Structures are given as C-alpha cells and as structure tokens.
Amino acid sequence: MKEVATKKMNGAESLVRTLVAGGVEVSFANPGTSEMHFVAALDKVDGMRCVLCLHETVTTGAADGYYRMTGKPASTLLHLGPGLANALANLHNLKRARSGVVNIVGEHATYHLRHDALLTSDIQAIAHTMSHWVRTSSPETSVAKDGADAISAASEPPGHVATLILPANVAWSEAEGPAGTNPAPMPAQVSDASIESAARVLKGEGRVLIMLGTRALREDALLQAGKIAAKTGARISAEGTNGRLQRGAGRVAIERMPYPVATALETTRGVTHIILVGARAPVAFFAYPGKPSLLYPPEAEIITLAAPCEDVLDALEQLAERVGASKSTPILNSRHRPDLPSDALNPSSIGAVLCNHLPEHAIVADESVTTGRNFFKDTHGAAPHDWLSLTGGAIGEGLPLAIGAAVACPDRKVVALEADGSGMYSLQAIWTIARERLDVTICIWANRSYAILKGELAGLGAGIGGRRAQSMLSLADPPLDWVKLAAGMGVEGARVTSAEEFADVFGVAVRRKGPFLIELDLSS
Ligand SMILES: Cc1ncc(C[n+]2csc(CCOP(=O)(O)OP(=O)(O)O)c2C)c(N)n1
C-alpha cells in the first residue's frame, strides 16, 4: 500500500491528495456551489490537471477517452443529482467501453438534506443505474479512505464506474489526511479448462469464429489471434463497436461486426462455434419486426476463452501455444495509398482521403454514423493508428472522447470523425479542445439530417414517413454553420465542398499542431 504523509487539512484536500497519490491525475470537471471546497483544494495540491467541461456529458465522455488510452481512471466532478443526470449518457458509453472512472458527485451538507432544498435529489438512485460501485461519504467516516476505495473499485479489471458522493460538509470539515491506495488489481488468469475447450473446438471440424473485444484488440493480443486464425482456419472478428482497436498497416487484419442485421448475419452464416475473447456474442442493436436478435446461428456453440475482466493476452498466448500457432504467420494489413479522389465529396472519396492522410499513430474518435459506415473498411491500410468507437450507442461522445484521448496522449494527433447530429449533443467539447489547446482535427459530416433514422424508419416497417416524420429527421433548416460555431469557441475551421479540397485541407490540418475543424458539406 502506498503511504502518504499527513498534515492538517479539510476533507476535500485529503480526497484530492488521495486521488493524486493513487494515480488519478486528471479531473474532468463541471462544479457548482457544493463542490467549491474540492475546487479550492486543487490549488493546494500539485499533480491534478483540472479540465473544465461546459456540460457534464463532456466530462464523462472525456474520462472514457482518457481511460481507453491510458488504462488509468480519471475523476469527474459533477454538481449534485442534476449534474450527474446530465453526465449519464456518456457514463453509459464509458461503462459499455468497460472503462474505469472515479465519478465524484457533490451533495448538500448532510444536515441540509432534510430541508429538501431545490437541488436535492436521490443521487444514490441516479448513480446506481450506471455505476458498479456507489458510496456517499459521511462526516463520521474518512473521505480519504472512501477516495482510496473508489480508486480500487474503478481499477477493477477491465475498468469500473465508481461513484463517490461528496457532501459539502464532509469536504469542508477537518479531515485526517490522505489515505494510502492499493496498486491496481491484475486481471485474473483464465482456467486451463477454458484454454482446452477453445483448443478442442479449433482442432475440430466446425466453422469457428473468434470474436475479439476489449483488451484482445490491442496489437500484441491481435497478433496472437491472427496466428491462431492462420494456423487453424478460424475467422477473427471484432465486436461491432470497440473501446480501442489497434489497426492499420503492419497490424493484424480484422473486420468488425456490421451494424445492419442482414449484413451481420451474412458474415456469420454457417458458423458452428464462437470463441469469445474479451467479447460478448453479437446481438443486434435493436429488434426489427421479423428479424432475429442474435447475429449468429442460434445453434452455434459459444465458448468463452476469456471474459473482459480476465487476462486476455495471456489466454491468447496460451491458446496459440496449445494449437501450435506460436510460429504461424498472421495476415497483416499492408500500407495502401489509394489515388486521391478528384470527384464529389462522398463517403468513399472521404474514406480514400482518410486512408492516405491519417498520420502515424493517430487516435481516431469515430462517431461517423451513416457517413462513416465504410470508413473502417476504407482505412485498413492507413498508417498504424488506434480506433475508438461509440460503445454504448448513446450519441454525443465523439468530441468528448477526443478530449480525453488528447489529454492522455499529448504527443499523438487525435482525429475526431463526427456526424453533425451527434456532434450537436456535446458541442461544448470544442470549447474545451480550444482552451486546453488539444491537438485535435475535427471532421464534421454535415449531411444536415439524421440520415440513419431515415433508414431505420423504413427498416422498422414504419414506411418512409410523411412531411412531419421527415421533418423530424432533417437538420436542414436552419443549416448549422460549423465553421462559425467553432470560431465562436476559439477553434479555426474551414468548409469544404469537394473531395480535392478535403484532401488538401485535411492533409494540412493533421500535419500542424493544435485544433482545427473541417466542415464537409454533404447536403447536396
Ligand atoms: C443519446 C441518444 N439520443 C438519441 C439517439 C437516437 N439516434 C440515433 S442516431 C441519431 C441521429 C444521428 O444523426 P447524425 O449524427 O447526424 O448521423 P447521420 O444519421 O446523419 O449519419 C439519433 C437521434 C441515440 N442513439 N442516443
């Protein structure tokens, strides 16, 4: 246990000192009155970078991006129940990404609660919906110890949501001093029986799909999976949406489960066995009349090699050994430089530009929705990069994820691929990107509609919709001016209307340091 020196201080300071000593070095914050002692403590303690976010959904999305890139929890700072409520959509995405966070929520002073002041709510109840661990500090116990326990809870493999509720009088009252923290727990080893079952299936007759998620999508684990596939003829696939996938030239070639049910079913037709490695068996995003929920043949046998909380890399290494694949040669992506397009701005010309110009070791925060449905395929041969996607389906995380990734990895270029409708959910993130001078290139796909929902309207058998239904899916009137929106928040930008122009502007933007926004006019 890491010990920390003690001196006279209040609860807030003892908590901040505990967080810093426990490796929580960034706070994505949107404070209010009840959090003022926490805010004041930030000046008394070195080592905590405080990033102001102008809406709570930005704080949790940023904490998610930070965890995905560092494997370390950040903290948030939220204002009572309503602040937490605003943060929930991206807390949901964070939880689905299996990221960890120390989610700190201010609360009224304990003696004030009985008066039911305006901002009073049942914070515990709100928190439980999206947290693995919830605790309210009290004047009778040690807030520093609560903070240390929250760090341990957040660090549970592969990452958990730990919500610590901090009453104002606990924050301002004298406290014992910081508490020591335990090292982050290691993921558990998988059992030999799990390795054996997977090996048996791979050596058998059936058609095997190895479904990879979470830690299995890092370069080293993917290499093992690629070797196993090469040796046994099994196919590998990533889940449909993934917290962090290391891909691009020189890395193992891998597809991901497609979003449309019919396309996904095509890819699993005839599969007899699915081996799960840090992943779940694939299910459709939604139910559709007359279509199945499972994206694989229901008679297929499901074998779990490693759960996301287990040591996925070690499991794959052991399995590779067991099936004699350790020295096999996996299929790797080769560098592809498609001709730069001179035609119209459309998904395929954009994909070609991305494949050409994504800088080496870029981090892609992808919330492209329909425009980007093929970007993943289009960029297999791009320079090596990390791909972060929307894991929980709650739109409005792309820009916040970019903040977290850029804070986590200041030496890497972050590229946010953002659909215009989704971007409007957490627009405020652009201000934080400017204020923190983060190295983020933002591409906005301005199709001025909720294009995906037009397809869903038909896909659900609800028809193509009349004037009112169609107007619910249109963002055309008034048209959003993203270049002006960005300028209003301190970020320079440009609008492009042709593929050539995009190639030029994107090529320059990713090679210079600092924020830049490109609006791609896809409305025609
Ligand atoms: C929090 C949340 N609210 C609403 C939705 C429903 N929804 C899914 S996609 C979508 C519109 C997306 O539009 P846009 O981001 O512009 O992408 P496009 O469909 O045009 O490609 C909406 C409203 C959601 N997924 N999450």
Image (tube, rainbow, N blue to C red):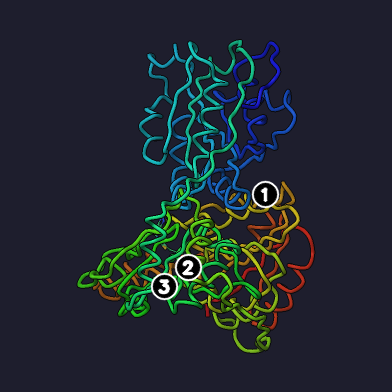
How far separated are the C-alphas under marks 3 and 2?
12 Å
Dot 2 beta carbon under 8 Å from ligand 1 = yes
Residue type at mark 1: give it.
Ala
Q: Say whether residue 42 is left or right of residue 195.
A: right
Say which amino acid is labelled 3.
Pro
Mark 1 in CB contact with mark 2 (< 8 angstroms):
no
Mark 3 or mark 2: which is in front? 3
Task: State the residue position of label 1.
Answer: 408
Residues at marks 1 and 3 touching, judged by CB atoms closer than 8 Å: no
294 relative position to 169: left or right: left
As measured in the structure, the alpha-carbon distance from the residue carrying label 1 to the one carrying label 3 is 29 Å
Q: Residue at x 44, y 11 (%)?
A: 111
Determine the secondary structure under disc 1: helix
Residue sitting nearer the eye, 147 or 509: 147
- Could you tell whether 329 is left or right of 512 in the image? left
- Find the distance from the CA under tag 1 to the CA under tag 2: 25 Å
- Among the 4 quarters of the image, the one containing residue 24: top right
Disc 3 target residue: 258
Q: Earlier in the sequence, mark 1 or mark 2?
A: 2
Residue 86 on image: x %, y %? 46, 41
CB of mark 3 near ligand 1 (< 8 Å): no
